[in-house]
Amino acid sequence: MIKWKEEYKIGVEQIDKQHQKLFEIANEAYELLKNDFCYDKFDRIIEILTQLRDYAIYHFKSEEEYMLSINYKGYPAQKEAHDSFVDKLNAVKLDTIDENQNQYILELLDFIINWISNHILGSDKLIVSQK
Ligand SMILES: [Fe+2]
């Protein structure tokens, strides 16, 4: 279970909602992966992971626009962090993952959600405090 926590809130409603949505999508993939009674679930898991990647890209763009709109000084560092994370996600060849790679998908999900949580707590929280 990948849990959203109140402490992840940065105080900008639109960004908080998007962060929460990232957790929801990741959790959907995680729940499906853990479900032993569901057969042929891998196509669906790959679909959700693709959705997670696409939503992360969409979210970063919208967060970056917000930072620019308030002339946030930390924008270049944020942009760089977002870009390098997207590069990492794009390097994962989702279409080659098959059912023997349960553990791989689990580790991938852990990596994604850890990155997002650390990024929210370490960087995104500063957007508002330095406004
Ligand atoms: Fe960010």
Image: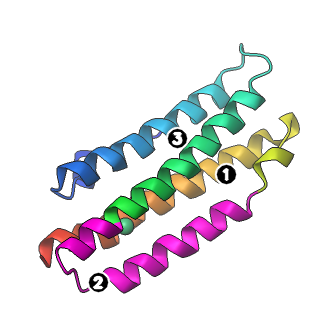
Residue corresponding to mark 3: 26
Numbered label tally: 3
Please state the extent of the stretch shown in magenta in the rendering. 64-92
Please tell me which of labels 3 and 1 falls first in the chain.
3
**Res. 97 mark:** none
Residue corresponding to mark 2: 74
| Amino acid type, callout 3 | Ala
Residue found at x 17% / y 56%: 12
Residue 60 percent location from the top left of the image = 42, 62
Residue found at x 74% / y 58%: 92
Q: Ligand 1 near label 3 (Cβ, under 8 Å)?
A: no
Please tell me which of labels 1 and 2 falls first in the chain.
2
Q: CA distance from mark 2 to mark 3?
A: 27 Å
Q: Main secondary structure of the magenta part?
A: helix
| Left-right relation of 48 to 130 | right
| Left-right relation of 46 to 61 | right
In the picture, the quarter occupied by the C terminus is bottom left
Mark 3 element type: helix
Which sits in the foreground, 110 or 92?
Answer: 92
- Asked whether residue 68 is drawn in magenta, I would say yes
Residue corresponding to mark 1: 107
Residue 130 percent location from the top left of the image = 14, 79
Res 3 seen here: no
Please tell me which of labels 2 and 3 falls first in the chain.
3
Residue found at x 23% / y 46%: 6
Q: Vertical placement of 28 versus 70: above or below?
A: above
Which sits in the foreground, 36 or 84?
Answer: 84
Tag nearer the camera, 3 or 1: 3
| Left-right relation of 38 to 77 | right
Number of residues whose C-alpha sits closer than 10 Å to that of mark 1, classed few (under 14), some (14–19) or many (20 or more) = few
